[in-house]
Amino acid sequence: MRATAQQILAKLDEVSQNGNWPAFDAGLGVLEYHAMRMIAVRERGGDEDWGLAFECVLGDFLDPGSDNADAANVSTYLVIPSDLHGIREQRELELSIAGPDAVVAGPADSGTIDIDGITVVGPAGELRCDRSMIARHDLRPGMLCGGCDGGAVSSRAILLIRAYLAHHAGAFWRDVTPLFRAPCDVVVTSDAFEHVLGRRDLGTGDDVEPSVRRIAIAPSESPTFRSLAEALASGDASRFVAGESNLDWRKWATVPDGNAPSGAAST
């Protein structure tokens, strides 16, 4: 028997509060945030019935070809009925520096933020960067979403990732359906929806942004996720109502980068 919307929401509540669930800032336990999309599926056969995946671009330095789990990566958070805490799969971010200046995006360049003349290579091809991109794409040098404790390993790498995504949105996404345990049909795919963090005690202090308090709720309290559960239970994608998207990293880039050069935020 297919899961009901109420059963789906109960599982989402459980994982969002106690497991692998994406967030936007370090206070809720993630690396530097860049982008997210959600894929909701119904399985064909098997025991799982439904599944949900969040793909997230995360990280603050590039280390191509390494197995460094802290380097920039695409993390896929899976929620399936039988898994208690959800699953997090990671793969290397396919972004590197062309030519002999490759070291500029590694840990050794802490505090360096100029991207002029650097060419990055990713899934959508090469991108030659220049200073004008910073203002043109509102790349906000020196400001973080909060995923770097104290400051970024590479302030420059963060700008390069932001610049690449500004030119090639969605370039790092891949087919995640093989991660589920049975063949499945995609019901909803969205890279523009109102995400929530799960019900959390953020205290009563004024140091918590109102925008964070607004989404520190359980999925079952969110109109977006309630509509997603209805879409999954019925198989009718039209029931999904995305709400006002909060996935743009600029919404969360409010934390000064302690390792950025002085005055970088106004560059």
Image (cartoon, rainbow, N blue to C red):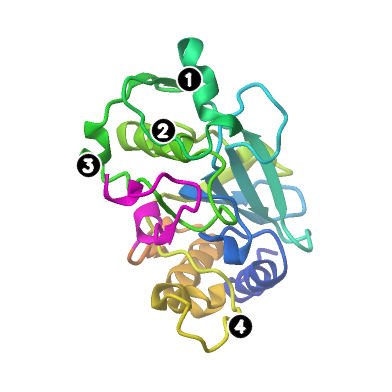
Q: Amino acid at mark 1?
A: Ile
When asked about the image quadrant of residue 26, the answer is: bottom right
> 110 or 194, which is in the foreground?
110
Q: Amino acid at mark 3?
A: Ala
Give the residue pinned by disc 4.
Answer: 201
Give the residue pinned by disc 3.
Answer: 135
Residue 10 versus residue 258 in the image, above or below: below
Mark 1 and mark 4: Cα distance apart in space: 41 Å
Mark 3 and mark 1: Cα distance apart in space: 22 Å
Give the residue pinned by disc 1.
Answer: 97
Mark 4 and mark 2: Cα distance apart in space: 34 Å
Q: Does 4 sit left or right of 207 as displayed?
A: right
Q: Are marks 4 and 2 in contact (CB under 8 Å)?
A: no
Q: Does 251 sit left or right of 259 as displayed?
A: left
Image quadrant containing the N terminus: bottom right
Give the residue pinned by disc 2.
Answer: 160
> 183 or 137, which is in the foreground?
137
Is residue 255 within the magenta segment?
yes
Magenta residue span: 245-267
Residue 58 versus residue 3 in the image, above or below: above
Q: Earlier in the sequence, mark 3 or mark 2?
A: 3
